Image: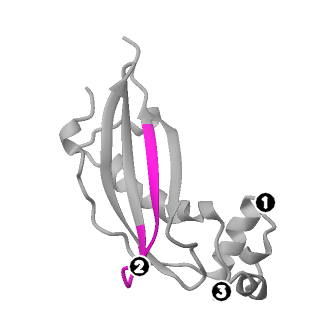
Amino acid sequence: MPVDASLIGRTYPPTAPYEVGREKILEFANSINDPNPAYRDVAAAQALGHADVIAPPTFAIVVTIPAGHQAVLDPDVDIDYSRVVHGEQRFVYARPVRAGDVLVVDVVISDIRAAAGNDIVTTEAKVRTVEGEHIVTAYSTIVARGTAA
């Protein structure tokens, strides 16, 4: 059964706060094999105008994937997660994530459509500091593959 398009606009509660630490940024930079000194050294980040080390652009996935699970695993959305593939991911930044940020994420279902027997669901995950400063919006599209008839 196709995902109910009336769920477009459904909003989920903010996530619990996540404190971004230098060690987490370093671990992430190492995991993606990015040697950028701004991710590793405070002085290098400060030379670029940042108060502390910054995170690689894809670091936001650390907080947005768990937040997005609220929508993907919502019983009303009714997606068989075993049939899901990741269709698209993009980030639109207001500023880099930096060490010391305490982040929360608000998720909304922004689009639902069907194509070739597959359900395609797009979410927007708005990442902000606990003080309310917008940092980045992550757009994620998943495809729930249809079953063969």
Comparing 139 with 67, the one in front is 139
Q: In this image, 128 relative to 91: left or right? A: left
Quadrant housing the N terminus = top left
Disc 1, SS = loop
Point out the tag, 2 or 3, that comes first from the N-terminus. 3
Residue at the extreme left of the image, as rendered: 6
Point out the tag, 2 or 1, that comes first from the N-terminus. 1
Asked if labels 1 and 3 touch by Cβ distance under 8 angstroms, the answer is no
Quadrant housing the C terminus = top left
The answer for how far apart the CA atoms under marks 2 and 1 are is: 29 Å
Q: What residue type is labelled 3?
A: Asp
Q: Which amino acid does label 1 sit on?
A: Asn
Disc 3, SS = loop
| Mark number displayed over residue 33 | 1
Viewer-side label of 2, 1? 2
Check disc 3: other Cα within 10 Å, few if <14, some if 14-19, many if 20+. Answer: many
Check disc 1: other Cα within 10 Å, few if <14, some if 14-19, many if 20+. Answer: few
Is residue 117 depicted above or below 36 in this figure? above
Is residue 33 depicted above or below 19 in this figure? above
**Where does label 3 land, which residue?**
52
Question: Which residue is found at the position 45% from the left and 36% from the top?
Answer: 82
Write down the quadrant of residue 148 in the picture.
top left
| Mark number displayed over residue 19 | none
Horizontal and vertical percent position of residue 56: 66, 66
Q: Does the magenta stretch include residue 134?
A: yes
**Where does label 2 land, which residue?**
133
Horizontal and vertical percent position of residue 107: 34, 59
Q: What stretch is highlighted in magenta?
A: 127-142
Q: Which amino acid does label 2 sit on?
A: Glu
Is residue 42 depicted above or below 116 in this figure? below
The answer for how far apart the CA atoms under marks 2 and 3 are is: 17 Å
